[in-house]
Image: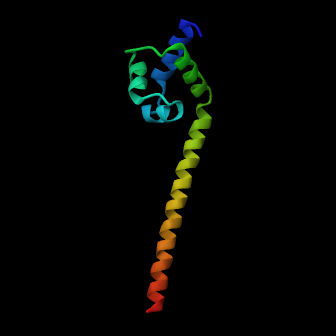
Amino acid sequence: MSDLQIVNISEVLKNSQLSNFFISKYTGFSQASISNWKRGVKKPSKPNALILKFFFENENRYLLEATIEKQEKQIQKLQNENNELRKIIKAFEAK
């Protein structure tokens, strides 16, 4: 990866609307490193720039995974609430 490609990846990162937390979750980089790269304080190393390149090339997949994960958590929460309501109804009916 050339220095120009690293600069390009840095620009993509700076212009990204994704949170540092989200990028960190899927790349394994610390939020502090991502913040430094976004602000131009530091540049990612070549290996790290390659990881970022792969991440941004597959950004939609990660967004979809995050959406599915969020929906699964919401479904689980609703199922738990439903189970609690059933317990309350059974207890009420038993009286």
Q: Which of 80 and 61 is in front in this view?
A: 80
Image coordinates of residue 27 in percent, x first then y, are 52, 30
Q: Is residue 55 left or right of residue 29?
A: right
Question: Splitting the image into 4 quarters, where does residue 72 fall?
Answer: bottom right
Quarter of the image holding residue 92?
bottom left
Q: Specify whether residue 90 is in view.
A: yes
Q: Is residue 36 above or below residue 63?
A: above
Looking at the image, which is closer to me, 91 or 56? 91
Residue at position x 49%, y 84% in the image = 90
Say above or below: 1 vs 58. above
Q: In the orientation shown, which residue stands out farthest toward the top? A: 3
Q: Residue 26 appears at what percent x and percent y? A: 53, 34
Q: Which residue is drawn at 58% across and 37% down?
A: 62
Residue 20 percent location from the top left of the image: 43, 31
The quarter in which the C terminus is drawn is bottom left
Q: Which residue is drawn at 60% across and 41% down?
A: 64
Quadrant of the rendering where the N terminus is positioned: top right
Q: Which residue is drawn at 48% across and 26% down?
A: 16
Residue 18: give x, y in percent of width and height: 47, 32
**Residue 18 visible in rendering:** no
